[in-house]
Image (cartoon, rainbow, N blue to C red):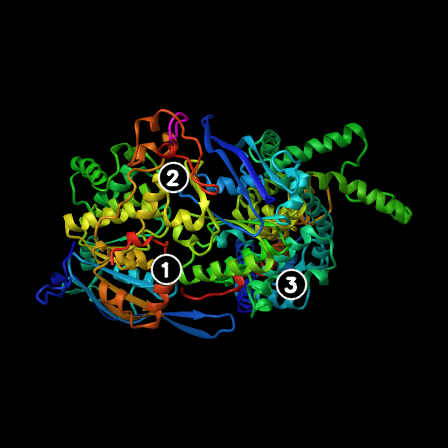
Amino acid sequence: MKSEESIADQDARPILKVASLAKRYTKRSLGGRREELFALNGIDFSILPGTTLAVVGESGSGKSTLALCVACLERPTSGSIWFENRDVVTLAENERREIRPQIQLVFQDPANSLNPRWNALQILIEPFVLQKTIKNGERKERAFSLLERVGLSSQIAGRLPSELSGGQRQRLAIARALTLEPKLLILDEALSALDCSVQAQIANLLMELQSSLGMTYLFITHDLAMAAQLADEIAVMSRGRIVEHGSAEEVLREPKHESTRHLLAAVPRIPRTPSSVIG
Amino acid sequence: MRYLLRRTVHALFLVLGVSILAFLFTALAPGNYFDEMRLNPQISPEAVAALRAQYELDRPLPLRYLSWMNSVLHGQMGYSFAYNSPVAPILFARARNTLLLTITATLIAWAIALPLGIWSAERFGRLPDRLLTWATAALLIVPDLALTLGLLVLAVRTGWFPTGGMTSLDFGSLPPGGKLRDLALHMTLPVVALVLSALPLLIRHVRAAVAEVLDAPFMLAAKGHGIPRRTLLYHYALRAAANPLISLFGFSIGALLSGSLLIEVVMSWPGLGPLLLESILSRDLYVVIGGVLLSTLFLVSGNFLADILLYWADPRIRTESGVR
Amino acid sequence: MDLVLGIQHLDVSYRSREGYLRPALTGVSFGMKPREILGVLGESGSGKSTLATAIVRLLPPNAHITKGAVHFEGKDLLQAELQELRPIRGGRISLIFQEPSLALHPTLRVGEQVRQVLAAHAAASKSALREKTLQVLATVFPEEAERISRSYPHQLSGGQRQRVLIAQAIACGPRVIIADEPTASLDPTTQMEILGVFRTLKEKLGLAMIFITHNPALLADFADRVMVLYGGRVIELGPAATVLASPRHPYTKALFQSIPSSLEGRDNSRKTRLPAIAGDWSPMSSRQEECSFAPRCAERMDVCSAREPELVSLSETHTVSCFKYEE
């Protein structure tokens, strides 16, 4: 559990710092008119190593675009993304290739991001083959230890993604993200497609990985309840801008912006009996 | 709208390009119409040379091309050496005969393939579907030539159908009803041959396209709304499966002039096929080029028609969203 | 009170490609009263989608209904002829599928798709149908019914598409609506809106609704009764207020506890482990001779692995299937 002090520690250098990030899309409609859409419009934030920043917002707020930009899968129109003091946006392609393994992405729907024709073992070995980092003999070993790490039994190794449950697939996706020992994990609605009880399991896994490996998370979601559970800091996005940003405590206890209040109000809650709420 | 404009311009350039290529290849091919004449000792070399000059065969290629283009724009499409007349009327007369066959055959083939393909897709994987798949595979394997010859043998053996040609010798003296019957009898075998050769591919494509759609969630949802089976199949499924089928239809239209060459030749049907064959063999330059141009026009129009139909049928194509 | 819909001892299995039968629903029984919202709580593998499609017999060809009855308007739907079912589907019982982007025909206009549902159940003139279509769309799109009617599904947002599905479902004035995870792919605000739409419709049209979801929080202030499905069986059934506030079955209890609740003011629960249910539900683990939840149950007793528990009545309205309450 992270205490308040480490977040406020001024000496700690952020592992990720985003400044004035903007991403513009041009839509050409049938009549020939050009519409400009700012998916991201001046985003600033930073994340300290070993912590979790939750970015919450409605669909269309730009959160997924943010994920893609930070993961170097989309080029921002302007602004900078500093990863460990190097501006990813200005790097040449070969330098960026060095950084990529350190920032990994886990998507919402593992069915779409895992190769359906490969079994779990092949999926985990692929990054090693591509990056040529681990020797051939060690790869299988590493893959199996990764499976264990994410709580999957070694029997899973020979199964195809279609033969796994939603929770198992997502664990596999996380395992694959971990193969190259990244420092930053971007989770784009990674829990949203899972059943409630499975969400809890994967959330626990993520928290455990963070405390044992010192992972940093950029957790993008529209589920404020889960964000509240996992995050040290929360940033609220609306229409391409960050409208509120602070520690999880502050944002949830005293929301200042209307969007935050909307999101809080929209969270469905189970009525808990008075005895289960510790005042 | 811009989509259609782009396609039109594209099509025009295509036709132009093909005309240049066709002209180039045919004109550059060794030999010409008058080579035959030279072998004939009765015709003097001077006469041949004079004829060649008359038909402008010795002028440089680009000039000949422009002069031919000019002729096309005037509706004549060059001059046929063999028939001693402008190419256009010869081509059009023959093309009309070909179209008679191919349009009939295309309509019949689609009329059979659509319901059969849908029927098969409904029973996907089960015995009736598998039987049909084997049947179409068998039909596909049989070469057109064998098919046509087989039909001819049938005609000879049974005497039910004439063994070639478009009309009987006494066509002119028949009453209108009799004329129609005569034409129909002559058309039957070639049309049957064309339909049989086109069916396998059509049925397979319809079956594949519809089967894919039948599995879709929206079909189940519609069934859940109590939509009756006929509407589900012919309105919902067919419309959703339309894209690949429209492309196929465009191709069918495109092949209207070119797909029946073999059958026409074997069955002595006086269509474009035999004309082109004969002209190629005798190096009747402008007939060949004209024929190629006409066929290309049809092909391009067929594709263009498919593009228009696709635009009309699929609203997702209409919504031209730019970079996401 | 007269039940609108009565399900009795429903057993459904799927035949796998290797040939063996995998049970998806076992012994499911419940009744629906008019004007009530029954929340069916179930996660993947619980059989909830099977239940939804089994009621109107829309199951895939490899599904077998091996036992049971579905009583509706004096008939047993499971024994009825297929022709008798067609007017019921969409006309008397409507099904709202998951994934609105997939449940609508991609190249037909929305108005057309609603009109088809109307046309399937009533012979009427084109203009009458057109008018009724607009009326129906107006109930879910109070301001822009005209424009929506002319649109294609891909031009609408997720929430709008969901409303279209709802419009199709209510078009012919059915008595029962079965909604399978209608808000699963929507973001929270839209989710709330759609729940609001359902509530309004319940009041205005007096519908009985089966609302299937895996998220119990959605059923708060919404459902009248809650039925919990696990491993194809009904393990708890009772008034929503009771089941949500004080669940009895160990699974239900564990499920509620695993939902993050730090928004409700518990400071020290942030960044702590959630009390998640261990393990996974897999079809292999549902043997007939034990409680389907036993392998994962924290309160497991010896008897739980020996036989299947019976349904026990905790009160007139609340039943639970668990050995803990069997005395």
Asked if labels 3 and 1 touch by Cβ distance under 8 angstroms, the answer is no
**Amino acid type of the residue that numbered disc 1 sits on in the rendered structure:** Val
Left/right of residue C225 with respect to residue A117 in the rendered view: right
**Amino acid type of the residue that numbered disc 3 sits on in the rendered structure:** Gln
Q: Nearer the viewer, mark 2 or mark 3?
A: 2
Q: Which residues are magenta?
A: C286-291
Residue C209 sits above or below residue A253 on the image: above
- Badge 1 and badge 3 both on one subunit: no
Which element carries disc 3, helix, strand or loop? Answer: helix
Asked if labels 1 and 2 touch by Cβ distance under 8 angstroms, the answer is no
Where is residue B245? Give x, y as percent.
Answer: 59, 49
- To which residue does mark 1 refer? A267
- To which residue does mark 3 refer? B54
Q: CA distance from mark 2 to mark 3?
A: 75 Å
Q: CA distance from mark 1 to mark 3?
A: 90 Å
Where is residue B91? Give x, y as percent.
Answer: 69, 55
Q: CA distance from mark 2 to mark 1?
A: 32 Å
**Residue farthest to the bottom?**
A33
